[in-house]
Amino acid sequence: MEGEDRPQPEALLEQAAREHRGRLKIFLGAAPGVGKTYAMLEDAQRRRKEGADIVIGIVESHGRLETEALMRGLEAIPRQLLSYRGRLLSELDLDAVLARRPALVLVDELAHTNVPGSRHEKRFQDVEELLDAGIDVMTTLNVQHLESLNDIVARITRIRVRETLPDSVLELADEIELIDLPPDELIQRLRAGKVYLRDQAHRAVNHFFSRGNLTALRELALRAAAERVDSQMISYMRAHAIPGPWPASDRLLACVGDGPGAESLVRAAKRAADRQRMPWIALHVLRAESASERGRDQAAAALQLAEQLGGEAVTLPSAADTVDEILDYAAGRNVTRLMVGRPRARRLPHLLPRLRASITERLARRAGHYDVTIVAADSMEAPSPPTIRADETQRPISLRDGLLVAGAVALSTALAFVADFFLDVPNLSLIFLTGVLVVAIRLGLWPSILASLLSFFAYNFFFTVPYHTFAVHQTEDLLTIFFFLVIATLTGNLAGRLRERADHTRQTARRIANLYEFSRRVASAAEIDDVAWAVVSHVANTLQCQAVILLPREAKAGGLEIAAGFPPEDHLTTANWAAAEWAWQHDKPAGWASETLPGSDWLFLPMDTPNGPVGLVGVCFADRTRPLTMAQRRLLSAVVDQAALAVERTNLARDIEEKRLLTETESLRAALLSSISHDLRTPLVSILGSAGSLQSYGDRIPPAQRAELLETIQDEAERLNRFVQNLLDMTRLGYGALTPKRDWIDLRDVIGRARQRLKKPLAAFRLSVELAEDLPLLHADAVLLEQVMANLLDNAAKYAPPGTPITIAARPSDGMVELRVSDRGPGIPPADRAAVFDMFYRVRGGDREKAGTGLGLAICRGIVAAHGGSIRVEDGPDGGASIVVTLPCPAVPAAPAEAGDTP
């Protein structure tokens, strides 16, 4: 076969891609404690002695002395420390490894989940980045962490493994070393405390590390390693043009035809694969010969059954030789056994010669190294007599076809008379044969057979002795006429079938292109109206019919409404609405060409999703006397399924947006109510109380108490003013109305005014101001920056204990000015440092929170961002928290020279 001795391009490209990546070696084990890390370190020590540049990225010794001993002598990259929920945790420092760029790095526990704040969520993603950088990696993995085995491991051990990784990571491995240990030895190591601590080991032996569980996990590990090795072997065979098969492991290929026994063959393949514990594939090759619609449906049903039974279903495009296609595919997949169905019994076997052997017979003769099993069809699936249906490619001959065939034969006869009169043509039958070929190419199979019969009679009547009679006297004329009939029939048959296959291929390609275009359109549609229009236009143009899409009304009253129609349609008759309502209520097709309300002009199909129907698609054909063909039904079903997914996607997006807005609205409303009821009402109560006392008692209040009450009114009024100002500023920020009025200002003046503004709240603290002597001028809004400074100082005064220091520091740094306000309060956890700048964040703690609207830091972020700066939270130098504001510091323009100045 052509190309059989050449490497496959895909395998060569995969091999070339691996050359630029680092090599990955995985030490695979069935369970913790089998010695994966120990084996990895032993291999690393051996390579170090050979002169390899090796570093330890991260290795977990779990306190095992023998493991720690093997780590000596190997360079270790310091780990990255990350704070999570008040604890410091260590992780692989990926940037440090990339900067060091060793030849080989050791990364333990491939399935590990990184601490939040790391670059990648999973450690295997760190390994992939190292491989992309050309660094070799050695790592360890337990088989229970493979995603595809998660459910199986849970059923075996009754423990759900939470840390998993995709099976595709295992495919990246250039080398897999299986670290195996018998269950009894592993249990002994466990009891000796070499895996877990004593109390943990006792619980583990009684649960996860039982002998049965370990045996099952060993089998899973062995299978995973064997499958990866088998995949590597197949890739090697493809890259080196080795035809195969190499019977290193069994693999079954079931050759599914388009006959009634296809499903029986699939079931037999499933039983055989289960008995031999081997993978199996169901393969269907589209044959060059035309297949009936019923045959294609049977083949499709068999492939669907194969997928349901756990096999792999594959369909290959039409081939000139089906046997060659099957053998090529079997060699590429390293198949060792073939299973085919018994060939059908031929009708009239004694009258019709067997001109060509069946696929089964030819496959059995050419199988070579393959084991071939022939399966008999079930007796209940005996083939029914053939019938000609309107939806098959072999359509009956119409009157127009008959007239064209008669014309072609008449033209061939006329050309034969001309050739016989003017030229010395040895065999005029070639002219009629040419006419038969033209008819076969233009009209198809059955018209070509009719043309061959008519040409046979015309040639016999006009051009064989005796003329103008169907009698034949000469033996050579009899042979000529006979072979002409045979050749004309065969060539017409072949040409007709090729034309039908070409037509079928063009129709299939057109349908696939239309489906692709439809999928692209609905995938890009963001609104439900766009999806509905894409659905109806595609259905109408593809099936040449009218189409509508019905969706539930927006109102709670229920019912359906026409969302789109093509051609534009906004009205349905009562009978059609009845069919649509029934289809919607019962989630079943209704209307024309269905079993319910077939008197309707429209056929309505529900758009089903896992959450129920989301609408209906309706179609109406001009000619309703002919039923839907199977091809039309499959196409319509595919479009309806895709439309259902698209409508559900838009509905989900709309619901999510509505829920988000509702949640934000409720959160804002609750926050405002909380602020008004707690924070704004508190100063009002103080003001009203003090004012009421002055009004009620008047001159009876001593002067000292009167001054104290007046001071309280003043302080609480200023506090209320700050709260209201924060609310106004936040509103201006939200609507983009806050525009800084920039001027050249001195930050010392801003800090001084803010201190004076908060003189009373800051009186209980030791305030320290540390400003650099070379502090430059800022081009900013002095009023807004004073608001920022006041909010930061107010925030520090709320949470820091009285008597503790509050520090204000400012210094220039790389063209910026860094302003820092530090306190000795409880600090802000790392997980909350980004959220503290959100609106009303503080009120989530309820009544236990300090007084305030929760808007101060949000306003600071908005004002600083309007100035082109940034704000963040850091740990204080002596505990507590530091709010760091960074502002741009442009160069101060030179003052213009005054009159009389000399340069």
Image: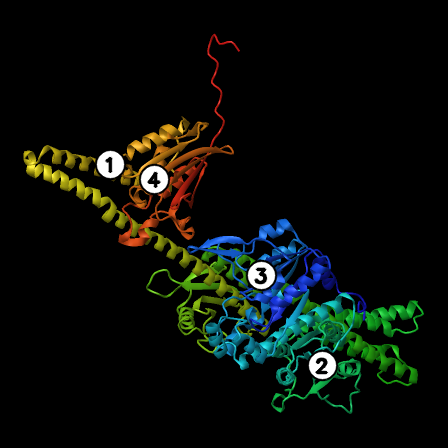
Please give the residue where the numbered disc 2 appears in the rendered image: 337
Give residue 718's mark. 1
**Front: mark 4 or 2:** 4
Please give the residue where the numbered disc 4 appears in the rendered image: 805
| Total count of labels | 4
Where residue 306 sits, quadrant-wise, is bottom right
Q: Amino acid at mark 3?
A: Val
Q: 201 left or right of 832?
A: right
> Alpha carbon of mark 3 to alpha carbon of mark 4: how far?
44 Å
Secondary structure type for disc 1? helix
Q: Quadrant of the N terminus?
A: bottom right
Q: Residue at x 80, y 75 (%)?
A: 491
Q: Residues within 10 Å of mark 2 (few under 14, many from 20)?
A: many
Q: Residue at x 91, y 85 (%)?
A: 475
Q: Residues within 10 Å of mark 3 (few under 14, many from 20)?
A: many
Q: Amino acid at mark 1?
A: Glu
Relative to the observer, which residue lies in front, 586 or 793? 793
Q: Amino acid at mark 2?
A: Arg
Instruction: Note whether residue 400 is visible.
Output: no
Relative to the observer, which residue lies in front, 181 or 647? 181
Q: Residues within 10 Å of mark 1 (few under 14, many from 20)?
A: some
User: Residue 503: percent from the left, percent from the top?
Assistant: 69, 68
Which badge, 1 or 3, is on the more N-terminal residue?
Answer: 3
> Alpha carbon of mark 1 to alpha carbon of mark 3: how far?
59 Å
> Alpha carbon of mark 3 to alpha carbon of mark 2: how far?
45 Å
**Front: mark 2 or 1:** 1
Which badge, 1 or 4, is on the more N-terminal residue?
Answer: 1
Give residue 59's mark. 3
Which badge, 3 or 4, is on the more N-terminal residue?
Answer: 3
Instruction: Note whether residue 176 is visible.
Output: yes
Q: Residue at x 46, y 27 (%)?
A: 774
